[in-house]
Amino acid sequence: MNRVLPVLPATPPARPPAPVAPFVRLTALWIQITGTWCNLRCTHCINASGPGEPWLPVLDAGTARAAIREADALGVKEIYFTGGEPFLHGEILPLLREALAVAPTTVLTNGTRIGATMADALAGLAAESPYSLEIRVSLDEVDPEANDRVRGRGAWARAVGAIRRLDARGLLPIVTATEILRDERAGGPGTYERFRTFLLSLGVEKPRVKIMPVFSTGRLERDGGELLTEERLEGFDRGLLQCAESRVVAHGGVYACPILAGLPEARLSTGSIEESFRPAPLYHTVCVTCHETGMSCRNY
Amino acid sequence: MDETLRPRPDREYRRIAVFGGVYNNSEALAATLEDTRRRDVEAVFCLGDMGGFGPHPDRVFPLLQEHGVLAIQGNYDESLASGRADCGCGYTDPRDNHFARISYEYTFTRTAADHKAWLGTLPRHRRVALGPHRVLMCHGSPRVINEFLWESTTPDGLLRHFLRQQAADVLLCTHTGIKWHRPLPGGERAVNVGVIGRPENDGSTNVWYTVLTATPDLQVEFVPVHYDHETLARQIEQEGLPAEFAETIRTGWWTTCLENLPTKERVRGKF
């Protein structure tokens, strides 16, 4: 029997170029201070951070200082430190002091390194700056067992300890939860209400909660997935995307997005921040999540 | 900037009064206007957001118009004028948005069409000369109508950037609901003039506006306004608006729309 073989094209069909987001202004400077070096290994980590050799190296303090100075001159509104776990960086406190001298500053942390001494040091930095210091502590569920299933054993207790210590010092932490366990909690109170109630039960009188969607990247990276297209973005104001007003300084250059920092396709400059003031390609599946949910990694 | 391209001020003044955020509070507006008459000001400016938390939105417009208040558009005004479905306040927290929705729906359905049309005629910015000072007035920030310029989240570098870009020496804004004044090392100034629609989360029931005087050095004075807040609180209740709105008017502590307060401002409040 004769079999008809499919005729394969000699080269794969060309993919249309990714749509872009305009550069509108520099509102937020992100400093990926510890790259992907972390003391936890969360199942859903957006950049696959962990305790092993980081795929994105730690940023040297000199580069971070230069970025703070340049961003100040460019009229930046706020500065964020992220990683990995920023409090693993040996110079995190002096760097926070320098950032707080020029702009309100936020640290995204898992809270595991915030004992009483660190909490005191942070309260001291906050008191000496005219600008707000915000500490965002990640916690994915109010129930210890469920939280530790995705964030690792003991993570809940250490994060909750940090929340209590920061709150006691008037630092009013912003508890940041992803919706990784949302399906398990279907039918009950929503994530926001659950966290608010939980924080009030801890004695936190001014509970602050930020909810983040789950991104199919990092440790949840899968082959395929939808991408943004020009047709899909028709009529949408791309200036609303956070990459239109954020830039990220990480090892290797300046990137458009805190989630994609370190990936060559997201790099906009290997030099100054100002050199990165050009349109950002919306090439990744995470761009679909930003577009659909309107989310921002910023505090508000 | 090329000298010929510099924006020209509308007019030159020596002494002006400026307030923001009326939030349907006609009691405070009447008291503020009465107070400005005693202070020898040449003009009164409003930096927008006529609607919000309070009752009977249509009561503020005759007061503004009869007293010749020179207003600009806030995000609330822009939303009302253009028929938007939300106030455009820029909240991101679900609890803030819940109360903002109630307030906006109430205001939208009770604001007369001619008042909405008037809001649509207001400019987004005003420029005046105050003695030798070039003053730029805006609602949120010069670049975004609903940008929050809190004292603790507005860097000097950003203010310098705004002033340089706008060829101004003095920036006046509102939107956040809490006043502040910052002289910059180069002699420029930035002033958040506060709001008269609700107290500023300090446990006092009075509201605030600002008087600016060119002597020719710029003098900035924050003026407290005490008004019949109990009458306003009762009207809020009679209109079926949330009890939290009346509580804020009676106690001076914010009970809603406070989740976007930065730490330094939030820690000073009760909630």
Image (cartoon, coloured by chain):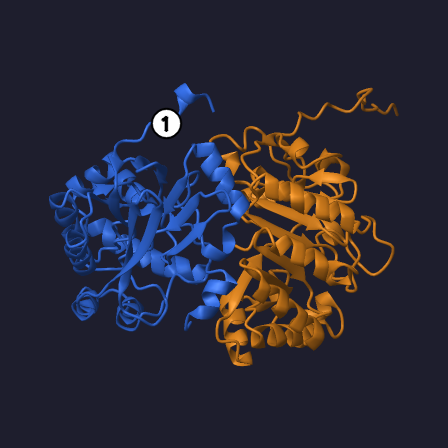
Q: What is chain A's hue in the picture?
A: orange
The residue that disc 1 covers is: B7
Query: Measured along the vertical axis of the image, is residue B77 above or below residue A152?
Result: above
**Mark 1: few, some, or many residues within 10 Å (few <14, many ≥20)?**
few
Residue in view at x 58 percent, y 74 percent? A169
Q: Nearer the viewer, residue A102 or B87?
A: A102
Q: Is residue B157 visible?
A: yes
Residue B225, located in which quarter of the rendered image?
bottom left
- The answer to whether residue B60 is left or right of residue B132 is left
Q: Nearer the viewer, residue B221 or A51?
A: B221
Q: Nearer the viewer, residue A297 or B163?
A: B163
Q: Which chain is blue?
A: B
Q: Amino acid at mark 1?
A: Pro
Q: Nearer the viewer, residue B20 or B105?
A: B20
Q: Chain of mark 1?
A: B
Residue A190, image x, y percentages:
50, 66
Query: The C terminus of chain B is located in which quarter?
Result: bottom left
